[in-house]
Image (cartoon, rainbow, N blue to C red):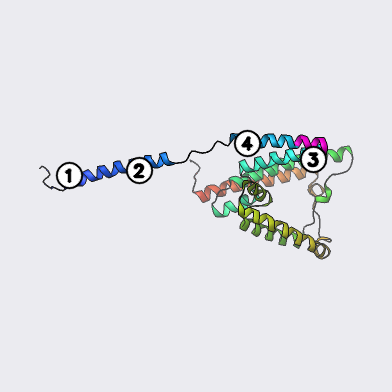
Amino acid sequence: MPDTNPTSGATAAPAAGSTSSIRRSSAAGGRARKKKKNQLPIGVLVFVLIVVVAVLLNTFLSSSLALFWVFGCCFGFILQKSRFCFTASLRDPCITGSTSVTRAVLIAFAITSIGFWAIKYGSFLTTGSIPGQSYVMPISLATVVGGVMFGIGMVIAGGCASGTLMRVGEGFGMQMLSLLFFVIGSLIGASHMGWWTVNFIAGAPRIFLPDVFGWFGSIVVQLLLIAALYFAAEKYEKKRMGITGDE
């Protein structure tokens, strides 16, 4: 039977008209969107400035300062582009379930472990001395208290030391405030360091893995531990995200 409802055609027409108006509105909104500014000239200017400062430091002060300047700029650039942050490596698994940054940090630990092991072992074979032994810190209650306080603080601040400095360079006001109190907290901690040293740190044990497992055993144990944490993080992410082995 033919449609005898006089309102059916009227109803269909506005629907089509409204669809057209939505499309026109979307197109107009797209045209109204501002075009992003070309930041290439700014990048070139910053690069030239970095080179000029490096040359001036090398000429009038020292080559070491010039090297530190170039290394710091390159390191900051890598941090900014990779969004590498120790806070995210510990925070993201708990909040979002993602462990991509966690695994990146573990890979960095593995690479640096091999590098430092090679430097220390090479020096031990050639000179009989081991560089950097002053950085083998005692494990005490101060380690636990400091770790918990710093962990809470970096999650609230939204970044560790490297992440905070990187975001300060990006112009984030929150991280500028975090950096200020980072400095204040460091000064307070330094003023109380003597008390912690006398009561907890001085008599605490120092653990140097080559003393326990030998030189080759220490690097094997450390790499195996890092590998175990890596695969555990990967499995944890798949379980949190509901990813099966087939996907």
Query: Which residue is more in the foreground, 27 or 151?
Result: 27
Judging by the rendered image, the residue that carries numbered circle 3 is 65
**Looking at the image, can residue 140 be seen?**
no
For marks 3 and 4, give the one nearer the viewer: 4
Residue type at the position of mark 1: Gly
Dot 1: within a 10 Å radius of its alpha carbon, few (fewer than 14), some, or many (20 or more) residues? few
Residue 97 x, y percent position in the rendering:
54, 51
Q: Is residue 186 left or right of residue 202?
A: left
In the image, what residue occupies the spot 51% across and 42% down? 245
Q: Which mark is residue 9?
A: 1
Residue 156 screen position, x and y as percent: 61, 58
Q: Are marks 4 and 1 in contact (CB under 8 Å)?
A: no
Distance of mark 2 from mark 4, alpha carbons? 36 Å
Q: Earlier in the sequence, mark 2 or mark 4?
A: 2
Seen from the viewer's position, the closer of residues 228 and 61 is 61
Place of residue 238 in the rendered image (x, y in percent of width and height, measured from the top left): 53, 47
Above/below status of 142 relative to 170: below
Q: Quadrant of residue 66?
A: top right
Real-space Cα separation, disc 3 to disc 2, in angstroms: 57 Å
Kindly report the secondary structure that dominates the magenta region of the rendered protein. Answer: helix
Marks 3/2 in contact by CB < 8 Å: the verdict is: no
Mark 4 residue type: Gly
Q: Can you say whether 120 is above or below 142 in the image?
A: above
Is residue 153 visible in the rendered image? The answer is yes
Nearer the N terminus, badge 3 or badge 4? 4
Q: Say which of 96 and 42 sits in front.
A: 42
Q: Secondary structure at mark 4?
A: helix
- State the extent of the magenta-drawn residues as a range: 54-62
